Image (cartoon, helix red, strand yellow):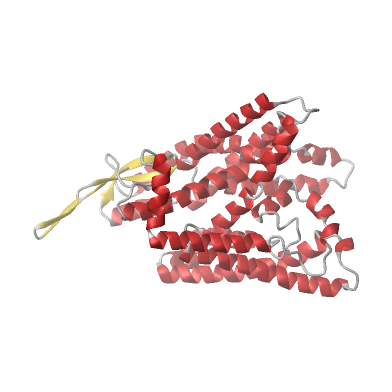
Amino acid sequence: MKKFIETIKNIYKIEELRTRIGYTILLILIYRLGCYIVLPGLDPARLSALQGSTQEGLVGLLNMFSGGAFGNASIFALGVMPYISASIVVQLLGMFVPSFRKMQMEGESGRRKMNQITRYLTILILAIQGPAYVTGMIPRNAIAVGWSGFAFNMISTIILMAGSMFVMWLGERITDRGIGNGISLIIMIGIVARLPYAVVAECSQKLSANSGGGLLILIVEFIVWFFVIIAAIALVQAVRKVPVQYAKRVVGNKQYGGVRQYLPLKINAAGVMPIIFAQALMLFPMLFSLSDKTRGLAATFGNYTGFWYNFVFFILVVVFTYFYTAVTVNPQMMSEDMKKNGGFIPGVKPGKQTMKYLDDILDRVTLPGSIFLGLIAILPAGAIKMGVNNSFASFFGGTSLLILVGVVLDTLQQIEGYLLMRHYDGLMKTGRLTGRSGM
């Protein structure tokens, strides 16, 4: 505890870090305030149907990413999801389209071009999602008297587009003048905002007189949750270090290179994207519920705690982990970069053999990573089966837990970087935060 207090004092002593943290907190408060501002022309008391339909499935995922704004019909209802969707599309284009790949190689100017294309694509996605949300999600009886349907739809769509672009701007300002990745922080704050309500609901359920649980069961749940968090941290942080030797060059009286470094290959290079893709795909059987012959199939895959739903969900997460890793991690590019910089893997010839060697390592490390990610993805269903409240069970795994762990670790790493630059001890002197000097 004394070490923690000393670290807080060191953070306060660094003026730049203190300013950045204060600026980040201010913008986050603005975002959270906007999540409760309902669209003009709506009666908030009549939105219970919308809030009830945004608890599960992909819609529940969107509501989670928006910090509850999606279910509140807020001006920030669409949140940053359109921007994330546009970023994923542009990232995939950079892997398959030569012109986009060339922009990625152009450094800062190429990055600005890619960001501009991402913004334009975000507006296009908003122009599609905005009217769909207004007409498909908002109950008609919630529209105040005196508002025509066309006027409400048009004004609400424009406000939703402007609100989402404002949230994106907040995220960029946090990235530039705050601490950490702004978009990720905004998503994390939306998830964390639901945590206190989930914990209170779980405690009330277990400690109520009619419950079959009690204080002991509640303590066991929190202990299990703690170990699940530790396992998620291990999944996010785990890397396979591939030794890389750089050739020695002598220029005049100076020697360059001749050192051994490590190429870190993450066990979970895909992050949470496989879970998001798998959850979206699991909603397709629901489209066949209109036919009597396929209604049983839709009912089977509509049961989020059923065996077949979670079995198929697990398989999809494993498959998408391999797919997304293959798309985002390019062994050929890594091999070429090493060759250009005079680097080589000891015992492996540069070029095609290095590429094949890295590809084999990726296949081997992705297998346990994908299985572990699949288990994390289906843990909430197991928690619900064990009697955990639905809202609290979502924090036992899945997208919520992985985003929380990933963003918190990234933010801690950012703060630790400032502390180490000023010759202060980091946040965890004996910890293993990735990027800590001396590791």
Q: Is residue 15 left or right of residue 380?
A: left
Left of 246 or right of it: where is 204?
Answer: right
Up-down relation of residue 50 to residue 370 (above or below) = below
The extreme left residue here reads: 253
Residue at the image point whose x is 58% and y is 29% from the top: 223
Return the x and y of residue 298 as percentages of the image width and height: 81, 41
Across the whole image, how many numbered discs are drawn on residues? 0
Q: Quadrant of residue 292?
A: top right
Residue pictured at 71% horizontal, 66% vertical: 75
Task: Judge by depth and name the residue closer to the eye, 128 or 95.
Answer: 128
Residue 319 visible at all:
yes
Q: Is 165 positioned to the left or the right of 77 in the image?
A: left
Q: Quadrant of residue 167?
A: bottom right
Q: Which residue is pictured at 72% across the width and 33% down the height? A: 308
Return the x and y of residue 374 as percentages of the image width and height: 59, 37
Q: Residue at x 59, y 46 (%)?
A: 274
For the residue pair 311 and 40, the one nearer the viewer reads as: 40
How far from the left and from the top, in percent, is residue 355? 38, 47
Can residue 434 be seen at all in this image of the molecule? no
Q: Residue 212 location in percent, x, y?
A: 76, 24
Quadrant position of the C terminus in the picture: top left
Which image quarter holds the N terminus?
A: top left
Q: Is 34 rendered above or below residue 277?
A: below
